[in-house]
Image (cartoon, helix red, strand yellow):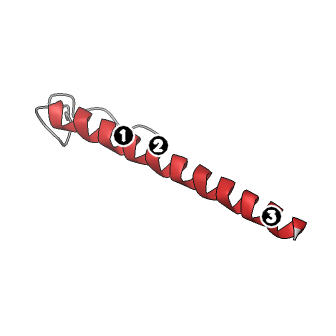
Amino acid sequence: MYEYEIYRSTSAELIRRADAEREIGRARRARRAARRSGRQDPEGKVRQGDRSRFAPAA
């Protein structure tokens, strides 16, 4: 019986941690979406005038 109580306690703690991680992920996605919606161009800026340069190395 004691092992079962430890199992239930551990299981409940893992579920709480998973819920907290999901909430953090949701908050991050919401912040990113808010930042993106505030921009004029969702694709970002591309430099037009400087075509003579090589592509940056990875």
Whether pointer 2 and pointer 1 mark residues with C-beta atoms closer than 8 Å, the reply is no
Judged left or right of residue 3, residue 30 is: left
**Residue at 15% across, 28% down:** 49
* Marks 1/3: CA–CA distance: 60 Å
- For the N terminus, the image quarter is bottom right
Residue denoted by label 2: 24
**Residue at 66% across, 58% down:** 12
* Marks 3/2: CA–CA distance: 29 Å
The picture quadrant where one finds residue 32 is top left
Task: Name the element at disc 1.
Answer: loop
Q: Residues within 10 Å of mark 1 (few under 14, many from 20)?
A: few
User: In the rendering, which numbered label is found on residue 26?
Assistant: none
Kind of residue indicated by mark 3: Glu
Q: Viewer-proximal residue, 33 or 6? A: 6
The picture quadrant where one finds residue 5 is bottom right
Q: Viewer-proximal residue, 49 or 23? A: 23
Q: Viewer-proximal residue, 4 or 56? A: 4
Residue 28: where, in percent of width, then height? 39, 40
Q: Residues within 10 Å of mark 3 (few under 14, many from 20)?
A: few
Kind of residue indicated by mark 2: Ile
Counting residues from the start of the chain, the first of labels 2 and 1 encountered is 2
* Marks 2/1: CA–CA distance: 36 Å
**Residue at 20% across, 35% down:** 46
Judged left or right of residue 23, residue 17 is: right
Kind of residue indicated by mark 1: Ala
Find the residue positioned furthest to the top. 49
Counting residues from the start of the chain, the first of labels 3 and 2 encountered is 3
Mark 1, mark 3: which one is toward the viewer? 3
User: In the rendering, which numbered label is found on residue 5?
Assistant: 3
